[in-house]
Amino acid sequence: MSELDVRIVNLEPMRVASFHAYGDSPENEAGKKLMAWAKPRGLLDTPSEYRIFGVDNPEPMPGSPNHGYEFNITIGPDIEPESDVKIKEFPGGLYAVARCEVQGGGFEVIGETWKRLAAWREGSSQYRYVGRQCLEEHIGPFEVSDSFTLDLFLPISD
């Protein structure tokens, strides 16, 4: 296995619209909700202008096929909450970031990359883990697909 390329990133505070689902495949359901809301507003037309982050919420529990997942898309101050869309203020912070390429439904690479990123942090004498939410940023055009690119964000402090 090749060495993990880790970048240190300071995320600025962000205002986001949030879309949540719970079940045995909540990522797809939450993604569909985000697309149904963001696409008509043109927010998915230029991926470089808006950032999309996913988070487990709640995290998977041993013995249960169900868990929650939430997608968050950055938005401007002019967008107001509506129906089941929640508006949140993300505080930002320092993160160790590693890229993860998912190809043809090989979703296990996500968990493997998370393990490698956690091992990198455990081996670091400079950075320690802090109790903020881990994030998965979607890179490039957002669509529900079996192939996509993520940047995994592990919260740290120095």
Image (spheres, rainbow, N blue to C red):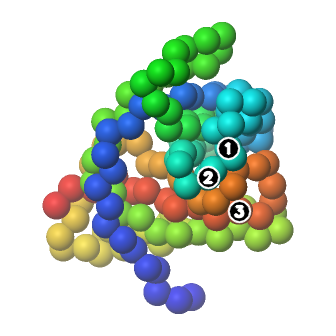
Residue 79 place in picture, x, y as percent? 52, 21
* Crowd around label 1: few <14 · some 14–19 · many ≥20 (10 Å): many
Residue named by callout 1: 44
Relative placement, left or right, of 125 versus 49 is left
Residue in front for this viewpoint, 115 or 33? 33
Relative placement, left or right, of 9 versus 153 is left
**Residue at the limit of the structure toward the top, as seen here:** 83
- Amino acid residing under circle 2: Pro
- In 3D space, how far apart are the residues under numbered discs 3 and 1 (Cα atoms)? 15 Å
Residue in front for this viewpoint, 52 or 39? 39
- Amino acid residing under circle 1: Leu
- In 3D space, how far apart are the residues under numbered discs 3 and 2 (Cα atoms)? 13 Å
Cβ atoms under marks 3 and 2 closer than 8 Å: no
Residue named by callout 3: 148
Residue 143 place in picture, x, y as percent? 76, 49
Q: Earlier in the sequence, mark 3 or mark 1?
A: 1
Q: Earlier in the sequence, mark 3 or mark 2?
A: 2
Q: Residue at x 29, y 55 (%)?
A: 10
